Amino acid sequence: MKRVRLTCLLVFAAILLVAAAVAWSQQPGAAGSQPVDLQTTEEVVQYTVQQGDTLWALAQKFYNDPWDWPLIWETNTDLIQNPHWIYPGQVLKIKVKKTETVYGEAPMGHAAPHHGAPDLFEAPQMHVFDTTFSYDTRVNKIDLISDDELDGSGRIVKNIDNQIMVRDENLVYFTVHSGMQVKPGDVFTVFRVERKIDHPRKKNIKAYLINLLAELKVKEMHTMPNGKVVYSGVIQNPVAEVLIGDRIMVMDRSAVKIRLNMAHVEMNGMIMAGPPDGEIMMRPGVMAFIDLGQKQGVEVGNSFSVWRQSDDPDNLPAYKIGNVIVMRVGERFSTVLVTYAIREIVVGDTILSDVH
C-alpha cells in the first residue's frame, strides 16, 4: 500500500512540474519562448493644458517627437482654433499608441523579428518641416505692416446709427486713398494700430503692429455735392468692436496651406518683432515677424535658419539656434512660425534663407 501511495505522489509531483514548466515557458523572455510579433493598440487619453505648454512640447512629451504636434491638433480642432495658442485649463484628447511584445514559438524556418537597436550604419530618420496644416488668418490676428501700407489704407469715418461702437451688420461710411479702385462686393479688413515697431538696427525702417478686428463688405459709392467720394459698407465677422477712425485695407485673409517651399535665392534679414502678446523670448510654436517680404522675394513656405551673434564677433563666428517657416508674406515684412530652437529666439537675431 505504501508503495502505491508513494507512486501516486511521484506521479502528482511530476504533473505539477510539467505544468509549472509550461507556464514558465510562456512567460516573456523564458527559455523556449521567443518574441514573435509586436501588438500595437491605440487609446485616447485626456490632458489638461498647463501654463507654458505648447503643442510642440506636448508632442515631445507624448510622442517623443515635437514634429508630430499636428497629430494633437487634428484630434482637437473643435477646441484649438489656432495651433499656435493653447490655454491653461483646456482638456485635450491625445491619441497614444502602446506597443507590446507577443511571445511564443517562432514558426519553423522563420527567425523571430529583431527589434533591438538599429544598425549603426543605417541612415537616421531626419525630420524636416513637411507637415501640411491650415492656418486661418482672416480675422482676430495680429499682423505687421509697413508705413507705406499704413499711409495707403482707408478709414471708417461715420456710423449710420451714430454709435461709438460698431458691431456685426452695422452700416458704416468710409473713405479710401485716392486712386484706389473700389466696387460693390469688395471686402476690406478692418484693423487698429497697436504700436510702432522700430527696426533693431536700421533706423530708417519702421513697422506697425496691427490688430485685425473685422471685415467690411462694400455696398455703394456716394459722390457728394462737393465732389467728395464716400463709400458705405457693412461690418462682418467682427472679433472685437469697431471704432470710428479704425483703418481698412485689402488683405488676403483666406485660409493658407503651408508647405515647405525652399527659396531659390539667398536672403538674409532679422527677427523684427515677437508675438503679439509682447513675449520677448520666442520658442517653437510661437509666431514672429521678419524684415523681409515680397520686395525681397519671400514666398509662403520659405524656411530660414536663425543665427545668434557671438559675444566676440570679431574672433568667434555666429552659431545657429533655430528655424522658422514663412506663413504670410507682406510687402516688406512677413509672418513666420518658429519650428525649432535650441535657444530662445529674440528680436535682432539674424535669419538666412534655406536655399535649394
Image (cartoon, helix red, strand yellow):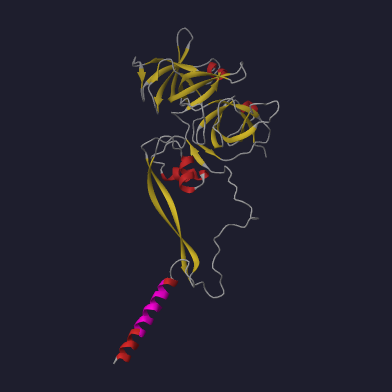
Q: Position of residue 202 (x, y in %)?
A: 62, 18
Q: Residue at x 55, y 60 (%)?
A: 116
Query: For the stretch drawn in magenta, what is the main secondary structure?
Result: helix
Residue 237, image quadrant:
top left
Residue 299 shows up from this direction: yes
Q: Residue at x 62, y 57 (%)?
A: 119
Residue most extreme to the front: 2
Asked if residue 137 lies left or right of residue 324, the reply is: left
Q: Residue at x 41, y 47 (%)?
A: 94
Residue 173 magenta: no
Q: Position of residue 349 (x, y in %)?
A: 60, 28
Q: Is residue 179 above or below residue 356?
A: above
Asked if residue 252 lies left or right of residue 350, the reply is: left
Residue most extreme to the left: 1
Q: Is residue 220 above or below residue 89?
A: above
Q: Is residue 237 above or below residue 260?
A: above
Residue 182 shows up from this direction: no
Q: Position of residue 4 (x, y in %)?
A: 31, 91
Q: Which residues are magenta?
A: 10-23
Residue 262, image quadrant:
top right
